[in-house]
């Protein structure tokens, strides 16, 4: 199970995910925190992260890297194409595939985009462009409804500072909240950024959520002190 957190602004897009893979051994739930779930895409694509069937997501990632013109329609066709090919080989994968979903970032006509691909109630592939300036969260399927509601009310429905560091800090707060209430989510957070402010930058970083929170809290405090020191005085 996985958590995926994404956000899109006029200048940048961010995708974040955890690194935990859960499995069972002798009736005990075990996990590995070394999984790489944030997948890099070739430029002008950005990053891809999904929830669900890892084999399907891996094949979709491979095909997405070959899309010459990234846009919502082409991602949707690729999503359906991968599902069709896998089901021809093994129809028993149907439920695992249609329960999967995926977020991807890319540059299209000079704009940063964040798309979401999934299967609807008729098992048809759908890809939609997500709204700007709102956190998008793919929760682990067993995440408590009450905790989900709290995050929605406090982070998705509330206004946010659109500065990059401020958004990363809020994202890390969400990540910590989810990981603290779900043993299927690691404390390690991977973050992929596609930034068009100035020249286009694509980069990623990862670390323990508490360490990253400290870094960004200190960074914002430093920015605030520096700004205060340069305020004009009478």
Image (tube, grey):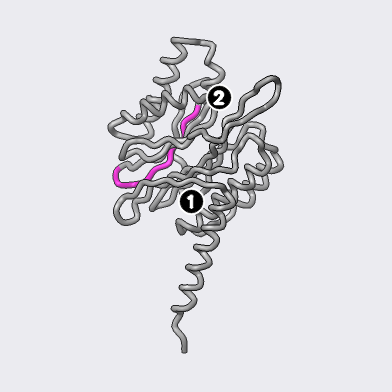
Q: Is residue 168 above or below residue 57?
A: below
Q: Nearer the viewer, residue 205 or 107?
A: 205
Residue 131 percent location from the top left of the image = 47, 45
Q: Is residue 28 above or below residue 200?
A: above
Residue located 40% across and 29% down the image: 61
Query: Are the residues flagged by discs 1 and 2 in contact, CB closer than 8 Å?
Result: no
Q: Is residue 110 above or below residue 23?
A: below
Q: Is residue 30 left or right of residue 50?
A: right
Residue 185 percent location from the top left of the image = 61, 37
Residue located 61% across and 34% down the image: 140
Q: Nearer the viewer, mark 1 or mark 2?
A: 2
Residue of label 2: 99
Q: Is residue 39 left or right of residue 158?
A: left
Residue 71 percent location from the top left of the image = 35, 35
Q: Which residues are drawn in magenta?
A: 109-118
| Residue 216: mark | none
Q: Residues within 10 Å of mark 1 (few under 14, many from 20)?
A: some
Badge 1 element: loop
Examine the image and state in which quarter residue 85 appears.
Answer: top left
- Of all residues shown, which one is farthest toward the bottom? 234
Residue located 47% across and 43% down the image: 15
Residue located 50% across and 73% down the image: 225
Residue 157, visible in the rendered structure: no
Residue 148, visible in the rendered structure: yes
Q: Residues within 10 Å of mark 2 (few under 14, many from 20)?
A: some
Badge 2 element: loop
Residue 138 percent location from the top left of the image = 56, 37
| Residue 133: mark | 1
């Amino acid at each position: 199970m996985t958590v995926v957190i994404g956000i899109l602004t006029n200048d940048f897009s961010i995708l974040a995910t955890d690194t935990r893979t859960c499995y069972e051994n002798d009736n005990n739930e075990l996990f590995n925190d070394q999984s790489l779930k944030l997948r890099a895409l070739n430029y002008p694509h950005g990053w891809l992260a999904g929830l669900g069937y890892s084999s399907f997501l891996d094949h979709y990632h491979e095909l997405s890297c070959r899309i010459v013109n990234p846009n919502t329609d082409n991602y949707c066709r690729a999503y359906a194409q991968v599902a069709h090919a896998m089901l021809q080989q093994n129809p028993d994968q149907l439920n695992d595939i249609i329960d999967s979903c995926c977020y991807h970032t890319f540059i299209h006509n000079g704009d940063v985009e964040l798309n979401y691909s999934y299967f609807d109630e008729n098992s048809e592939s759908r890809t939609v462009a997500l709204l700007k300036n709102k956190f998008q969260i793919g929760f682990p399927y067993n995440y408590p409804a009450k905790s989900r509601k709290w995050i929605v009310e406090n982070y998705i429905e509330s206004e946010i500072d659109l500065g990059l560091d401020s958004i990363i800090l809020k994202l890390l707060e969400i990540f910590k909240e989810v990981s603290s209430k779900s043993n299927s989510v690691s404390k390690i957070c991977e973050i992929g950024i596609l930034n068009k402010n100035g020249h286009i930058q694509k980069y990623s970083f990862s670390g323990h959520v508490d360490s990253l929170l400290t870094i960004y809290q200190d960074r914002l405090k430093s920015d605030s002190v520096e700004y205060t020191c340069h305020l004009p005085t009478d």
